[in-house]
Amino acid sequence: MRTKTENFPTLWNDNQQPAPLKISNWIDEMFENAAGTSGLRNASFIPELNVYETDKEFEVSVALPGMNKNDFELSYESGLLTISGERKMERKENGRRYHRLESRFGKFSRSLPLPGDIIDRDKIKAHYENGVLQITVPKIKEKAARKITIS
């Protein structure tokens, strides 16, 4: 009967020290190197966004969980809607040891081209709640889509 666990692929060995996960770390590094993201793991991240269009407006939703509305900014210039900011990691040790951090932290910037000739830039609105930034970009009324009656 075995009493030592150091030869098993577990996170912990007998003396409650983190066991090296060499194969897992090697695989992670290999994929990061192939994707060109090596060294950027904690340096930046790219928030996910969804864009919808209606007859009257564009709607953009950006996933920014764990952030405060003061952690990012929004601008519109020369046909580009830009969301930028920084997600900071607050490590509160309190006797804890981190074994794996998969959340992305660091600075980010996303730019989304929108057709500047139909955007009412003075009426762009944004609302942040429950980790989601909702941006409403209205179209100029005269240039918004309209139904055409067929005679």
Image (cartoon, helix red, strand yellow):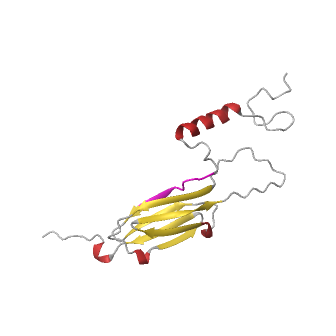
Q: Is residue 32 above or below residue 46?
A: above
Q: How many marks?
A: 0
Residue pictured at 48% horizontal, 64% vertical: 82
Residue at 54% x, 37% y: name it: 34
Q: Nearer the viewer, residue 89 or 33?
A: 33
Work out which residue is located at the far left of the displayed protein and give it.
Answer: 151
Give me the residue at 56% from left, 69% from top. Answer: 128
Q: Position of residue 99 (x, y in %)?
A: 74, 44
Magenta stretch: includes residue 48:
yes
* Above or below, comparing residue 145 to residue 88 in the picture: below
The residues colored magenta run 43-51
Q: Is residue 75 above or below residue 20?
A: below
Front-lying residue, 94 or 80: 80
Q: Where does the N terminus fall, quadrant-wise? A: top right
- Would you say 151 lies left or right of 38 here? left
Q: Residue at x 60, y 69 (%)?
A: 69
Residue 86 drawn in magenta:
no
